[in-house]
Amino acid sequence: MSSAWPSGAERRCLQASTSEVYGDPEVHPQPESYRGAVNPIGPRACYDEGKRAAETLFMDYHRHNGVNIRIVRIFNTYGPRMHPFDGRVVSNFIRQALAGEPITLFGNGSQTRSFCYRDDLVDGMIRMMNGPDDFPGPVNIGNPGEFTIRQLAELTLELTGSSSPLIEKPLPVDDPERRRPDISLAESRLGWQPTVSLREGLAKTIDWFRSVNLDDFRAPTPNY
């Protein structure tokens, strides 16, 4: 049996990139044409620059070897079945609120993010993979609704009915002040736009968190 890969439209390779390629952006919202403002030697650099390098490699293989690629720049995504201890802000806030623990804000919570519900993300990625071969990307897939981290915390408290207090801790180095996708390219080339609001998606995510035993997701303690 031949081990050769199929050619042409039968072979499509996805690069799941990230909005982190924009760094702490000086352009807002961020279009795909923006080249970003990334600190190459900062504590976030291994992730930011790793994704940027991956995009470079994908584009080189596309240009020089004819590989049929798709590059999707994913903005903050959340939803049911996300790992409760993945360290993301949505999972952290929901866990803390349901446990009645203080909700941790880094800085004063004025930095902004745009939150895309998982179903919208998957729809966008499928449209991209089924899209025309002359459109390899990159393309932003994210929800252009922009919220401060403090607003996210307050909405989490409202939807959970929690009385957890908000506490502030120092802002991490190179933490982006603003993050919002320009999705005009996805709208025009893929006919895509998100349909699930943050309130609706967050409520569904909270319901899932309530339905599981969070202890089942904790990493086991090494036994040396």
Image: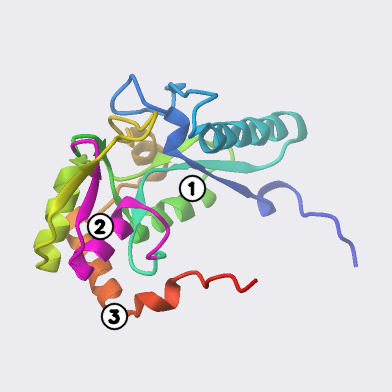
Residue drawn at (33%, 79%) of the image: 212
Residue drawn at (35%, 80%) of the image: 213
Location of residue 16 in the rendering, given as x and y in whole percent from the top left corner? 53, 46
Q: Is residue 152 magenta?
A: no
Q: Which mark is residue 128?
A: 1
Tell me if label 3 and label 1 are in contact, CB under 8 Å. no
| Up-down relation of residue 58 to residue 40 (above or below) | below
The CA distance from mark 3 to mark 1 is 33 Å
Residue drawn at (39%, 54%) of the image: 87
The CA distance from mark 2 to mark 3 is 16 Å
| Up-down relation of residue 218 to residue 122 (above or below) | below
Q: Please report whichever mark, 2 or 3, sits nearer to the chain's N-terminal start.
A: 2
- For the residue pair 41 and 32, the one nearer the viewer reads as 41
Q: Which mark is residue 211?
A: 3
* Disc 2 target residue: 93
Location of residue 197 in the rendering, given as x and y in whole percent from the top left corner? 20, 54
Across the whole image, how many numbered discs are drawn on residues? 3
**Mark whose residue sits in front, 2 or 3:** 2
The CA distance from mark 2 to mark 1 is 31 Å
Q: Which amino acid does the dot numbered 2 rest on? A: Phe
- Highlighted range, magenta: 84-108
Q: Which mark is residue 25?
A: none
Q: Which amino acid does the dot numbered 1 rest on? A: Met
